[in-house]
Image (cartoon, coloured by chain):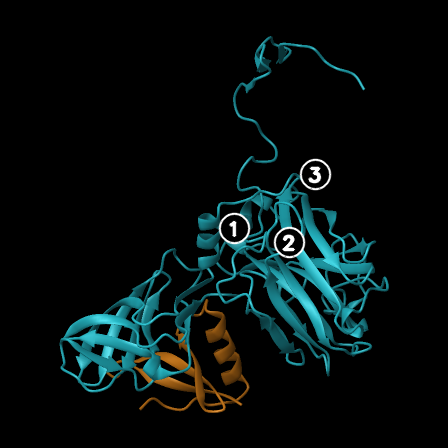
Amino acid sequence: MITYKKFNDDEGNWCSIIKKDSGTQVMSIPLDPANTDYQEYLAWLAEGNEPEEAE
Amino acid sequence: MSTLKVNSIQHSNGTDALTIDSAGNTSFNGVVTGTPLSFRNIIINGDMRIAQRGTTPTTYSLSSPGFRYDDVDRFCVNAGNVATGQVSSEQISSTGLDGFPTAKRITVTTTEASPATNGYMGFVTVLEAQMLQHLKWGTSNAETLTLSFWVRSSITGTFGGNIIGTDSRPSENRTYPYNYTISSANTWEKKTITITGDIAGTMNNDTGQGFEMDWYLYLGSDYQNGIENTWNSNSLGNSYHDNTPKIKLLATSGATFDITGVQLEVGDTATPFEHVPYDMNLARCQRYYYSIVGTAQNTPFGMAMANSTTQIQSVIPFPVEMRATPSLSTSSTASDFRVRMGGTNRDGTALPVFLMGTPTSAYITQEMSSGTTGQAGVYRTSYGTETYLAFSAEF
């Protein structure tokens, strides 16, 4: 199952998204609207899903 | 057959347009218009030379809709809603076709007799909209294109392909379906298709999709309500192709389909394939995918700095500007990544993560075994196992 987790930089700002498949990291995605993986994340959100918050 | 013996050809005003010396050398006066001599092939990696992700076969289940990139750059398997059928995809490097040492091959590994009405399988290359502005699509002066490619299959018969004007979405999925016939099994054949310019579509001048080109090998009936060799508005998404019966490659165990020498050019004539130097071809592919692969111990990725006792940061510049800020994927073992700092090795304890970036560089971070904050060092592989950082700005 695909899930997403927010990732913060060392100043606590949300800077990217980690994509996971069955809990294992498969990709790290920038917050760029032109990035296809980010577009897929937005579509996943639109389906009512919620990402895991950053640590 | 006749021969014209002249030393020059002139405009009616007496100006030389073309002169020929006694050795047969020809000089043109001014600019020669029409098909350009270079960069006339709109397709990137049409000779299937570049395969940054690898050359070995990858086998796919085909049930989930989507693109599957694992071998030849810019060309991927496109499939969905296929219940049981599976294929492998690979770059082959012994084609038997003069001038084309490489090709993309699809092999049926698990059969399925007939597609579901919404099932499909084939492969696709997607072209960037800003690279296509000279086609003047969406205007009355839209350029005619000619597609040519070499193809070889173990199955003979009628196959289908199309161009999908993806920039017209979501109101339309404008498509231009065409068919071609493979006459002899396991024999290279060159196919040529002329495509009229789309005067009614949309082509934004941006880094998004301009159009995609599909070669179908298995297609359900839901998509076969279009008309061949013309532009279909496809507003209902059911006109990707016409209803001519086509080969169902998945129905035959071990069936193969090879393709190379793909060229798309302005005009109504197929010119010889434009062979691009390897380094230029690679650079053009790296706009969409770039990887640094270490297969030996201590292969460098770049320089790094210890941001804390357990975290390093590194900036990786890209060799060419990428289409968008890319995603980062990596090999799966954190300890295969290492920094050498202050005479000490520090191995990864979690996988690298994208921190910030642009289309020209990535700023990444990784948790490492404990060390001294502030030290600088070399970010590299730790062992001889395949370790990679891969950046993707694919469509």
* Image location (x, y in percent) of residue A26: 45, 81
Instruction: Give the quadrant of residue B179.
Output: bottom right
Instruction: Give the quadrant of residue B20.
Output: top right
Element at label 3 = loop
Q: Which residue is mark 2?
A: B260
Return the residue nearer the eye: B144 or B388: B388
* Image location (x, y in percent) of residue B126: 58, 60
Badge 3: chain ID: B
- Whether residue B315 sits left or right of residue A23 in the image: it is left
- Whether residue B243 sits left or right of residue B326 in the image: it is right
Q: Amino acid at mark 3?
A: Thr
Write the residue at 33% across / 85% down. Answer: B350
Q: Amino acid at mark 2?
A: Thr
Badge 2: chain ID: B
Write the residue at 71% across / 46% down. Answer: B196
- Disc 1: CA contacts within 10 A as few (<14), some (14-19) or many (>=20): some
Q: Which residue is mark 1?
A: B131
Element at label 1 = helix
- Whether residue B258 sits left or right of residue B314 in the image: it is right
- Kindly report which numbered mark, 3 or 1, lies closer to the viewer in this rendering: 3
